Amino acid sequence: QVQLVESGGGLVQPGGSLRLSCAASGSISSINAMGWYRQAPGKQRELVATITSAGSTNYADSLKGRFTISRDNAWKSVNLQMNTLKPEDTAVYSCNAYIRTGIGGGTYWGKGTLVTVSS
């Protein structure tokens, strides 16, 4: 069974930084694209950033320059470095990945980690 588990969320003051991590586990043959999404209270889920297995990245335009996505293929993990955080960055951050197992492939999601930006 494949699982994605996020960590690193919490409370941070405006202007601060947080680093989120997401680790994949289970019977994994390979991992293609990985990504981070977020959902703020009362809003739809939105893309934060994605990264391919080759390291190509894509960011939401509004987050470029503040957020950085990276991945460690050996550890089957994806990270999100968030700097200069703003109250509007408050949301549940979830990671996803397209994962191939011995019986096929599919998109998997973690349960999410809450990031609260507040003084």
Image (cartoon, rainbow, N blue to C red):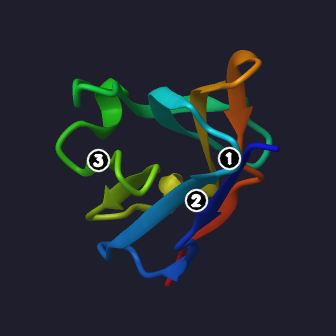
Q: Is residue 102 above or below residue 39?
A: above
Residue 29 figure quarter: top right
Q: Name the amino acid, label 1.
A: Ala
Secondary element at tag 2? loop
Give me the C-alpha separation between circle 1 and circle 2. Answer: 6 Å
Q: Name the amino acid, label 3.
A: Ser
Q: Residue at x 77, y 52 (%)?
A: 111
Tell whether label 2 touches label 1 (CB within 8 Å): yes
Q: Residue at x 60, y 28 (%)?
A: 99
Secondary element at tag 3? strand
Nearer to the camera, 95 or 40: 95
- Disc 2: which residue: 90
Of the two numbered discs 2 and 3 in the rendering, the one whose residue sits closer to the viewer: 3
Q: Could you tell whether 65 is left or right of 119 in the image?
A: left
Q: Could you tell whether 102 is left or right of 62 in the image?
A: right
Badge 2 local density, few (<14 within 10 Å), some, or many (20+)? Answer: many
Tell whether label 1 touches label 3 (CB within 8 Å): no
Residue 16, position as x, y percentages in the image: 32, 76
- Disc 1: which residue: 40
Which label number is shown at residue 70?
3
The extreme front residue here reads 102
Residue 22, position as x, y percentages in the image: 54, 56
Tell whether label 3 touches label 2 (CB within 8 Å): no
| Screen quadrant of the N terminus | top right
Which mark sits nearer the N-terminus, 2 or 3? 3
Which mark sits nearer the N-terminus, 1 or 2? 1
